[in-house]
Image (cartoon, coloured by chain):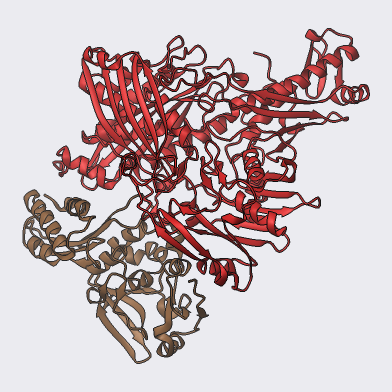
């Protein structure tokens, strides 16, 4: 059935949080609407209220402080893509925004919406994960901060409570370390990721890898860090043999976590291919 | 050739282009009628089931519902279909696919219509369903239609291929498969209707064939032909799907009973669920050549899944085998194509009628033969290319325009350059480059059946000329081309013509906008009408100018004495005089290409009066680690006979190549999962290669000013060229379209390419 939810647009974050305190369980926050409107049209949106948070100033802004790189949940994908601050401190996030949907979608879709929707294929999530992003959530009771890696409960299920809103993300800056994002789609634009991957690595003078952080999208029930692969690579030289062994471990880990599905036949190869592609610049 | 006052071969501004840019044309869904009712179709949710009961009582009580129609309400013939009538407007007794229309709601608003549609209770008794055409041909298979599941078989036989294979130096046999495709035209199907003051039913619709729609409405409703008027609205593409009766019948049924304005606008999901798809084909090709690469023999077994209804299935099942040889001369041929009913969504016409599928197979075979013989792929095509004087597999002697050689010649420098330099250019560690060729031929007009076009031209008492044509311009630009043809004959500028197009109250039948036939066939009909009028003008001019007819010509709205252009007479004077003397100034033009029906057993005959030819070169890059393919460039040479409007020809070539890239790499409609654009990928601007169109003009003696057609040919060579390019890149071939991520990566793995190249 088509639902016709009531529409509310609070002027301040506080008003929004008060609304959620009362109606949170019956409310779907609306920012860019690129997921919400699709659900609404498909008749899948059951909420009584749409809470328009797109104009809340408290959700805007990109800034750098001693805590890290802060990106408001209401910042659009286009704004991130055009931010010199993000370009300097999280280039892989920029790259994920470059191939995100289409220009029209990028102009309205927000990073908070992309994370909050908790899709396994959310393009901004793997870069956020390798930057050890923390999500700041607010409710009428106050704020709490959660490591993004712990926010997801399952596909399309985030741990955001009904009375909470995502306020901002705090990322650890790249600080000159190597970072990249790679994606496979069925076409070159407007494509949901068939698979995506983000890497943050710190090759040392002696040729061994220091920090290695690797996150996978569309390969596991929610995007996640591949810790076993990170541990395998850490301290090793990024030679061909190691990287190829790492790629096989990557596939094994993905299958171990996700299980076998019809798509596994492609994905267990593609994940190796994407891994080789993302590691290639580091290979000696 | 007669002088054509420079109107032929000139890219004049497209008629209606400025209006489109300004947003002025009225598409069906834009019609502003007086409080129209909206129509909503309830589709079947069963693959195959008997309908035991349709209970509309609860739905009828929904506020705003005016009427709910079922098959019982169809006044006369409930079956529709342009070739074979097998598709009910509303399901009677049983449903054969999930797209079948079961009931139709008319309501005051869309919300009421949708709510009511969900409250119609249909009691079904499921029947076993069949979804694979080969299964459908087995004895125990569930019968989709009473008459059985085999709709049609086309056979083409020439010589003795089995014996000829024995003498071949090389024979390759492979199986090819293609998928269901959805046309995905810009404008979802829509229509509107009202009663005119005389009580006639006026239906405005997005359509490729208004005069066919008219005949179907008359048949469904059992009313006199003059009681129904179909007006083609501005139409946002069709690609074959708007040849079927998608919304027009529903509008007519509601109008007939309710006598109130109605509108029916499909959502994208409804066009995906309830309109035709491209036929998936399974094709087993066996082709043999001698040591010089001369094709000696070929056989092919093809089976095409037409889903629940025939639609244009017969045309596809006839065209695919006729074109199975490709644009090559082969003495020994045995091809059979079976068209089979299943409980899948019905398949119908889609740009190329089975030839894009066949070309995928024959062009793959050409490259396989070349590889086996160590020949260059272009060379093996040149060796075998059809020429004037050759005979086709149906025994047709080609004596007119045969431009395949010129197409191959035109792409040669691009192809050789790509092989010599581009192929060896630098790529990153995961990429492999490839260059591929694809050639094709395509018969213009319907296959071995009559498909005439008519047109009328009229000069009023003041010398103004109006051209009436039933030819639906669905965006391809036929109205402009037809105006150029008439203007060229009459020596006027096209903007001096008033064009009346696609309105059954005023125009006569021009046949379908399909089979790349309108420029050639309707162009000839228009030319024929214009020549009759021109002849009257010249004859009258003799009297008035006192000069012999051979010394007179038509120029800028005057009959002019060639030797002294100041000695002339305006059309207006001639028209006034002719009117006074009772000389008719309205003339009909007619053209039907000369064909000979194909023999049912051997396929011998003349299926088409003329053929278009083409060759594409594709430059592709394959990511051997992920299966991603990038098409960088398409060089597309097309023999169109004569380009009446070169910019439109180039536009068709570009659009065709775009659709070809989709067919090659990503388009696939899975009946069980594809619902809308979110799960069906057509190429975006980012997926588009650079396209270099090359127009070849091998003049066709029977064509208007030498013209043939290009609408469908534009698409056909692209996919084979891309697939051959992928093969060139990864040294492994893909036999199942689309060459999606999974299939390309698999090919890369099979050929041992799934590895990082040594990093320099």
Task: Tell me the quarter of the image containing the N terminus of chain B.
Answer: top right
Q: Position of residue A72 (x, y in %)?
A: 37, 75
Q: Say if residue B352 shows up in the picture.
A: no
In depth, the one of B7 and B160 nearer the eye is B160
Q: Toward which corner of the image does residue A157 lie, by quadrant?
A: bottom left
Q: Position of residue B593 (x, y in %)?
A: 58, 21
Question: Is B266 left, or right, of B107 in this rendering?
Answer: left
Q: Say if residue B184 shows up in the picture.
A: yes
Q: Residue at x 20, y 55 (%)?
A: A264
Q: Residue at x 31, y 40 (%)?
A: B138
* Chain that is coloured brown in the picture: A
Seen in the picture, residue B83 relative to B103 is either above or below; the reply is above
* Chain that is coloured red in the picture: B
Seen in the picture, residue A163 relative to B200 is either above or below; the reply is below
Q: Residue at x 54, y 69 (%)?
A: B115
Q: What is the tally of numbered marks visible in this picture? A: 0
Question: Is B217 left, or right, of B760 in this rendering?
Answer: right
Question: Is B578 left, or right, of B134 in this rendering?
Answer: right
Seen in the picture, residue A146 relative to B361 is either above or below; the reply is below
Task: Tell me the quarter of the image containing the C terminus of chain B.
Answer: top left
Residue at the far right: name it: B580
In depth, the one of B559 and B417 nearer the eye is B559
In depth, the one of B695 and B733 nearer the eye is B733
Q: Position of residue A196 (x, y in %)?
A: 26, 58
Q: Residue at x 46, y 43 (%)?
A: B309
Q: Position of residue B495 (x, y in %)?
A: 73, 33
In depth, the one of B330 and B431 nearer the eye is B330
Q: Toward which corner of the image does residue B230 lie, by quadrant?
A: top right
Residue at the far bottom: name it: A141
């Amino acid at each position: 059935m088509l639902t016709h939810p009531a529409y509310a647009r609070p002027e301040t974050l506080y008003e929004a949080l008060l609304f959620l305190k009362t109606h949170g369980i019956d409310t779907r926050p609306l920012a860019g609407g690129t997921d919400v409107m699709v659900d609404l049209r498909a008749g899948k949106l059951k909420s009584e209220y749409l809470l328009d948070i797109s104009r809340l100033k408290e959700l805007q802004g990109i800034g750098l402080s001693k805590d890290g790189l802060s990106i408001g949940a209401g910042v659009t994908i286009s704004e991130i893509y055009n931010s010199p601050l993000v370009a300097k401190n999280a280039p892989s996030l920029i790259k994920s925004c470059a191939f995100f949907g289409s220009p029209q979608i990028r102009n309205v879709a927000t990073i908070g919406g992309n994370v909050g929707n908790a899709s396994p294929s959310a393009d901004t999530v793997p870069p956020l994960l390798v930057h050890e992003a923390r999500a700041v959530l607010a409710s009428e009771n106050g704020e709490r901060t959660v490591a993004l890696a712990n926010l997801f409960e399952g596909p399309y299920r985030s741990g955001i409570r009904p009375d909470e809103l995502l306020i901002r993300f705090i990322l650890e800056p790249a600080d000159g370390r190597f970072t990249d994002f790679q994606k496979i789609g069925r076409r070159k634009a407007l494509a949901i990721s068939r698979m995506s991957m983000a890497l943050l690595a710190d090759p040392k003078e002696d040729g061994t890898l220091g920090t290695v952080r690797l996150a996978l999208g569309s390969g596991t029930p929610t995007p996640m860090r591949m810790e076993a692969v990170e541990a395998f690579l850490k301290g090793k030289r990024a030679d061909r043999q190691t990287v190829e062994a790492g790629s096989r471990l990557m596939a094994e880990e993905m299958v171990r976590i996700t299980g076998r599905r019809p798509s596994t036949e492609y994905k267990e190869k593609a994940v190796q291919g994407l891994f080789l592609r993302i590691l290639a610049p580091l290979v000696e | 050739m007669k002088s054509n006052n420079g109107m032929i071969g000139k890219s004049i501004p497209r008629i209606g282009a400025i209006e489109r840019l300004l947003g002025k044309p009225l598409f069906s869904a834009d019609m502003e009628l007086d409080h129209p009712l909206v129509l909503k179709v309830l589709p079947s949710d069963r693959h195959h089931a008997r309908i035991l009961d349709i209970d509309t009582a609860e739905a009828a009580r929904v506020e705003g519902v005016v009427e709910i129609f079922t098959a019982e309400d169809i006044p006369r013939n409930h079956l529709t279909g342009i070739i074979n009538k097998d598709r009910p407007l509303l399901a009677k007794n049983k449903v054969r696919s999930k797209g079948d229309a079961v009931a139709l709601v008319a309501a005051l608003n869309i919300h009421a219509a949708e709510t009511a549609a969900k409250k119609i209770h249909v009691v079904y008794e499921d029947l076993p369903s069949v979804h694979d055409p080969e299964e459908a041909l087995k004895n125990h298979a569930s019968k989709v239609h009473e008459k059985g599941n085999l709709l049609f078989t086309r056979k083409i036989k020439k010589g003795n291929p089995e014996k000829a294979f024995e003498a071949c130096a090389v024979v390759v046999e492979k199986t090819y498969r293609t998928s269901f495709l959805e046309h995905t035209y810009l404008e979802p199907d829509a229509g509107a209707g009202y009663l005119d003051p005389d009580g006639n039913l006026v239906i405005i619709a997005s359509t490729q064939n208004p005069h066919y729609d008219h005949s179907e409405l008359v048949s469904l409703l059992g009313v006199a032909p003059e009681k129904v008027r179909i007006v083609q609205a501005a139409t946002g593409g069709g690609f074959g799907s708007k040849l079927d009766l998608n919304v027009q019948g529903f509008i007519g049924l509601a109008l007939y009973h309710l006598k109130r304005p109605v509108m029916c606008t499909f959502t994208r999901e409804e066009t995906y669920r309830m309109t035709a798809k491209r036929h998936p084909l399974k094709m087993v090709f066996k082709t043999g050549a001698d040591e010089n690469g001369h094709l000696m023999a070929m056989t092919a077994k093809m089976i095409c899944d037409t889903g629940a209804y025939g639609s244009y299935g017969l045309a596809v099942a006839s065209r695919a085998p006729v074109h199975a040889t490709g644009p090559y001369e082969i003495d020994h041929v045995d091809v059979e194509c079976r068209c089979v009913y299943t409980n899948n969504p019905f398949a119908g016409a889609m740009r190329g009628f089975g030839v894009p599928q066949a070309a995928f197979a024959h062009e793959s075979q050409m490259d396989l033969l070349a590889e086996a013989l160590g020949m260059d792929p272009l060379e093996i095509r040149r060796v075998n290319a059809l020429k004037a004087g050759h005979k086709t597999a149906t025994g047709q002697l080609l004596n007119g325009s045969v431009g395949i050689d010129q197409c191959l010649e035109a792409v040669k420098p691009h192809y050789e350059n790509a092989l010599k330099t581009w192929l060896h250019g630098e790529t990153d560690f995961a990429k492999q480059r490839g260059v591929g060729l694809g050639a094709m031929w395509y018969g213009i007009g319907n296959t071995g059946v009559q498909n005439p076009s008519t047109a009328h031209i009229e000069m009023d008492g003041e010398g103004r000329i109006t051209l009436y044509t039933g030819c639906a311009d669905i965006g391809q630009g036929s109205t402009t081309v037809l105006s150029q043809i008439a203007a060229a004959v009459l020596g006027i500028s096209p903007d001096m013509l008033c064009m009346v197009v696609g309105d059954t109250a005023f125009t006569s039948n021009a046949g379908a906008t399909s089979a790349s036939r309108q420029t050639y066939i309707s162009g000839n009909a228009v030319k024929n009408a214009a020549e009759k009028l021109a002849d009257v003008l010249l004859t009258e001019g003799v009297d008035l100018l006192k000069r012999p007819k051979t010394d007179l010509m038509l120029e800028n709205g005057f009959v002019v004495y060639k030797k002294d252009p100041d000695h002339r007479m305006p059309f207006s004077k001639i028209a006034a005089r002719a009117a006074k003397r009772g000389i008719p100034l309205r003339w009909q033009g007619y053209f039907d290409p000369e064909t000979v029906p194909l023999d049912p057993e051997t396929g011998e005959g003349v299926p088409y009066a003329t053929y278009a030819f083409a060759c594409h070169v594709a430059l592709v890059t394959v990511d051997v680690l992920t299966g991603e393919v990038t098409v960088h460039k398409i060089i597309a040479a097309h023999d169109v006979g004569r380009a009446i409007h070169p910019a439109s020809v180039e536009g068709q070539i570009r659009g065709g190549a775009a659709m070809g890239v989709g067919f090659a790499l990503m388009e696939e409609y899975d009946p069980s999962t594809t619902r809308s654009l979110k799960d069906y990928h057509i190429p975006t601007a980012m997926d588009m290669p650079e396209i270099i169109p090359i127009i070849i003009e091998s003049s066709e003696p029977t064509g208007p000013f030498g013209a043939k057609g290009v609408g469908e040919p534009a698409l056909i060579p692209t996919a084979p060229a891309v697939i051959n390019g992928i093969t060139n890149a990864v040294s492994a071939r893909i036999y199942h379209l689309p060459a999606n991520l999974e299939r390309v990566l698999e090919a890369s793995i099979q050929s041992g390419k799934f590895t990082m190249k040594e990093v320099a």
